[in-house]
Image (cartoon, rainbow, N blue to C red):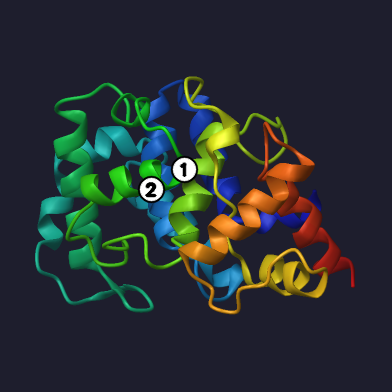
Amino acid sequence: MDYFAGDPVEVVRRCINTGDVRDVEIMGMVCSWLAFGNREQIHKKCDFAYRLMNDGHPYEYVVSEKWREYAGSKECFYRMRRFGDFHDLCERLSTLYAKYDSMEDVLIECKSGVEIIERIEEIMHHVGGIPKDTKSACKRLALFVRWMVRRDGKVDLGVWRRISPSLLLMPLDVHVVKVAHKEGLLKRSNVDMKACIELTERCREESFDDPTVMDYVLFAKDISE
């Protein structure tokens, strides 16, 4: 578990201490939005975002509308993410929380993992870095939902209690895909939503109620090798 000390989920976990699920949701969305590239740099930028957003109270930051100063900004936030994109992300979250007490409230009627991802895409439409459809594997959104839903008490946070872990999709991390191909769990070569569904269904054969627990098995196998 020492590996996860430098993982973006570590930054998200800090927000549990506030007692407000919206803090966890917002920080989870921001950190998953940043979760690409070098792991050390991802964690560093997630920590930056944590401090930027009212020093670990992101819901207060969103409703304060301090983010409006970044409207249209082309300044780099992280790699190809711009501060203007961060503004758009906060704007969509602000609109959401003006109507709902939690993002989970918008998702509880979804019947599948793909439907959950599609609904989040709809909520976050026009935000740079958020997929516009489910043709891609939507790895970062799948990761975000896993953080919110699974209740392992170690890595995943489990703040959403009304969505079953059985609906989760496998986040197609490069390590997971590598081992899945090697072990014959994934046949499809394109890393897209069809591959995500294929691997998730295969993992569901091993753990029907919690298929994404296999994420750790495949990830750990590649790291150990």
Numbered tag placed on residue 153 in the rendering? none
Q: Residue at x 75, y 61 (%)?
A: 219
Label 2 SS: helix
In this view of the protein, can residue 157 be seen by the observer? no
Q: Residue at x 14, y 28 (%)?
A: 98
Numbered tag placed on residue 113 in the rendering? 1
Q: Which residue was labeled with disc 2?
A: 117
Residues at circles 2 and 1 in contact by the CB criterion of under 8 Å: yes
Q: Position of residue 5 (x, y in %)?
A: 70, 52
Q: Amino acid at mark 2?
A: Ile
Residue 91 as seen in the image, left or right of residue 109: left
Q: Amino acid at mark 1?
A: Gly
Q: Position of residue 46 (x, y in %)?
A: 47, 57
Residue 128 picture quarter: bottom left
Residue 83 as seen in the image, left or right of residue 143: left
For the residue carrying disc 2, how many other residues have a C-alpha within 10 Å: few (<14), some (14-19), or many (20+)? Answer: many
Residue 3 picture quarter: bottom right
Q: Residue at x 11, y 57 (%)?
A: 69
Residue 51 as seen in the image, left or right of residue 152: left
Please tell me how many numbered marks the rendered image carries.
2
Label 1 SS: helix
Q: Is residue 128 above or below residue 143?
A: below
Q: Residue at x 59, y 33 (%)?
A: 165
In this view of the protein, can residue 7 be seen by the observer? yes
> Could you tell me which quadrant the C terminus lies in?
bottom right
Q: Position of residue 101 (x, y in %)?
A: 27, 21
Q: Is residue 172 above or below residue 144?
A: below
